[in-house]
Image: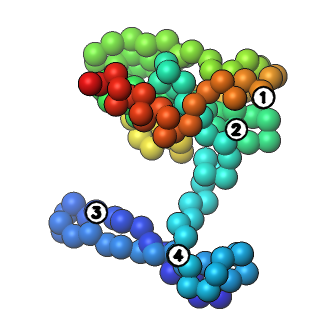
Amino acid sequence: YSLRQRRDVRDHSLSKSYHISIIFPVPWGLQAGTTQLLCTGPVLLSVQKRTDKHEWITTENGTGTVGISSSAQEALGNVIYCSLALESAKAASELYSPLSGEATEINEALAENPGLVNKPCYEYGWLIKRTLSNPSELDELVSKEAYEKYIKSIEE
């Protein structure tokens, strides 16, 4: 198999951009020469939804991981304290659970380093994991694209 990776990377110290492409071989079910982006993180291999209260949730195997959207992060600014309520230099914000279920894990790393909320949120800045007692509630949430349209509509 030949595999090339494509990724846009900005090197701020050298002010250069690097481009890497991923090309899948035919056994991935694609036509020869087809280019497809691949991200192997758990987020892209699962369902991802948003709420109008600026939370995101990814689900995999009956477990939901919840965090706050990048729009909420921008509105809050740098997070300086994190428990199940978030405090930033600008405001304090409560986390609303987008789905019912039992909490199974809290991102304890945020207690010592609350700024992780402002990092790539799907990897480091997630807040809580929970089992989903009613997965059909996912149908009431919106896609990333619909959420982005909603954000644009309230910004206008």
x and y percentages locating residue 59 in the rendered image: 70, 38
The residue tagged 4 is 35
Dot placed on the residue nearer the N-terminal end, 3 or 2: 3
x and y percentages locating residue 8 in the rendered image: 36, 65
The residue tagged 2 is 59
Q: Is residue 112 visible?
A: no
Q: Are marks 4 and 1 in contact (CB under 8 Å)?
A: no
- Would residue 125 be found to the left or right of residue 99 on screen? left
The residue tagged 3 is 10
The residue tagged 1 is 135
Q: Is residue 22 above or below residue 67?
A: below
Q: Mark 1 and mark 3: span between their CA atoms?
A: 39 Å
Q: Which mark is residue 6?
A: none
Picture residue at 56% right of the left edge, 85% below the top: 33
Picture residue at 57% right of the left edge, 65% below the top: 38
Q: Mark 2 and mark 1: span between their CA atoms?
A: 9 Å
Label 2 is placed on what type of residue?
Thr
Picture residue at 26% right of the left edge, 24% below the top: 156
Examine the image and state in which quarter residue 118 appears: top left
Q: Are marks 2 and 1 in contact (CB under 8 Å)?
A: yes
